[in-house]
Amino acid sequence: MAEYMRINPSTMLCPTPVVLVSCGEKDRPENRNLVTVAWAGTVNSEPPMVSVSLRKERYSHGLISGSGEFVVNLVDEALAKATDFCGVRSGRDLDKAKELGLKLVPADGMETAPRVDGAPVSLSCRVRQVLPLGSHDMFLGEVTAVEVRKDLLDENGALHLEKAGLIAYSHGLYHRLGEVMGFFGWSVARPEVLEKRMKAIRV
């Protein structure tokens, strides 16, 4: 039997996705910002909804509250250093995109929030609800559009996100996602299906 030791209650749900959230000021679309979020998640499928949690004092909190929209940009290894930078610098003090040489472009369906050019996937979100939780407010966003980098699509239009080189966040550390172990339902797949699917994934 494994041995355990009790520690203080904490947000020890690891790993988590790490994303770049882009947003802007409602009446000043030129005022845009990027914020790193490790507390993001999927919350609903119909309609598709995601959440991001931000401290009230964060600059992006006010921008998202005012505009009612944000874009969740998935992060690959090429964006890893920029992602860390956007988590430790404030948009009140500098233009992060300009400082990092990142290009912000119009996001599908958004009036104010841009997306990060080069991100593997960008999810355009409209705020449906804000839940005050204590240290953070949770923004529940309905996903109104998804833009995918074309090199991640095969000839049939199927998305191969396993080839994006995504990173994750775990207890203060960034990690590369590793080798694919299986797919949804692989534990009960017939041997011939398992072989075919795993072969396609690893090509």
Image: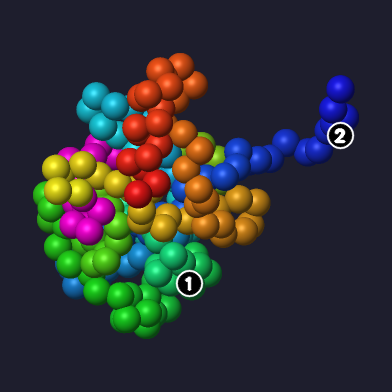
In the displayed structure, would residue 78 be above or below residue 1?
Answer: below
| Quadrant of the image occupied by residue 86 | bottom left
Using the image, tell me which numbered label, if any, was put on residue 5: 2
The answer to which of 144 and 151 lies nearer the viewer is 151
Q: Which mark is residue 203?
A: none
Q: Name the image quarter holding the N terminus.
A: top right
The span from disc 2 to disc 1 (Cα, nearest Å) is 34 Å
Q: From the viewer's side, name the closer residue of 40 and 54.
A: 40
Residue at the location (62% across, 58% down)? Answer: 173
* Residue 139 in the image: above or below residue 178: above
Q: Amino acid at mark 1?
A: Lys
Assess whether residue 146 is covered by the magenta stretch.
yes
Question: Magenta span covers which residues?
Answer: 141-153
Q: Could you tell me residue 164's position as x and y percent? A: 36, 56
For the residue labelled by badge 2, is the local secondary structure a helix, a strand or a loop? loop
Q: Residues within 10 Å of mark 1 (few under 14, many from 20)?
A: few
* Closer-to-camera residue (153/62): 153
**Residue assigned mark 1:** 81
Q: Nearer the viewer, residue 50 or 148?
A: 148
Q: In the displayed structure, would residue 7 be above or below residue 95?
A: above
Residue at image point 30% right, 61% down: 119
Evaluate whether residue 64 shows in this view.
no
* Residue 138 figure quarter: top left
The answer to which of marks 2 and 1 sits earlier in the sequence is 2
| Residue 37 % position (x, y) | 45, 54
Q: Is residue 87 magenta?
A: no
